[in-house]
Image (spheres, rainbow, N blue to C red):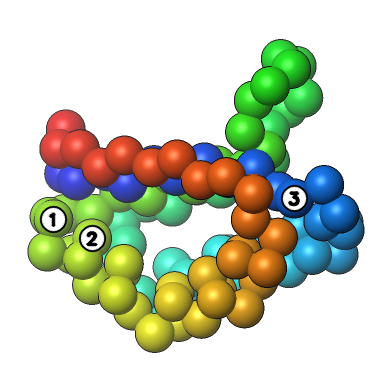
């Protein structure tokens, strides 16, 4: 299996509506991209200061399937239309497990 983990922090002026649009857009991806085997998203619980604000954990059968997801036009549109406008910082890692 191949896992993709990404963390986001939002710009100071990001609205709750914009953050909700990120979540809604990401929730559409499993139906649009059959290569996704498992997909979990969620906002930070707010327990520890300094954390990133939002996380995505996505599992795939292979690196090739991850690349389909990475480059998929629906995924790219979510990034361009709702994530990038409010993105302050991003961290990501991919690994085999």
Dots 2, 1 in contact, CB < 8 A: yes
The answer to whether one can see residue 34 in this image is no
Residue tagged by mark 3?
11
Crowding near the residue tagged with mark 1, few <14, some 14–19, many ≥20 C-alpha atoms within 10 Å: some
Q: Position of residue 78 (x, y in %)?
A: 55, 74
Q: Nearer the viewer, residue 9 or 28?
A: 9
Residue tagged by mark 1?
63
Residue 26, image quadrant: bottom right
Instruction: Name the residue at 12% across, 55% down.
Output: 62
**Label 2 to label 1: alpha-carbon separation:** 5 Å
- Between label 1 and label 3, give the one nearer the viewer: 3
Position of 53 compared to 63: left or right?
Answer: right
Q: Earlier in the sequence, mark 2 or mark 3?
A: 3
SS assignment at label 2:
helix
Residue 14, image quadrant: bottom right
SS assignment at label 3:
loop
Instruction: Name the residue at 63% across, 56% down.
Output: 87
SS assignment at label 1:
helix
Q: Earlier in the sequence, mark 1 or mark 3?
A: 3
Residue tagged by mark 2?
66
Instruction: Name the residue at 44% across, 74% down.
Output: 75
In this rendering, the answer to whether 92 lies above or below 84 is above
């Amino acid at each position: 299996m191949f896992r993709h983990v990404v963390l986001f922090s939002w710009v100071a002026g990001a609205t709750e509506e914009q953050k909700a649009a990120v979540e809604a857009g990401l929730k559409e991806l499993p139906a649009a991209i059959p290569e996704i085997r498992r997909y979990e998203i969620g906002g930070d619980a707010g327990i520890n200061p300094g954390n990133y604000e939002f996380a995505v954990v996505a599992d795939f059968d292979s690196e090739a399937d991850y690349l389909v997801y990475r480059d998929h036009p629906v995924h790219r549109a979510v990034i361009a239309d709702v994530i990038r406008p409010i993105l302050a910082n991003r961290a990501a890692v991919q690994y085999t497990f």
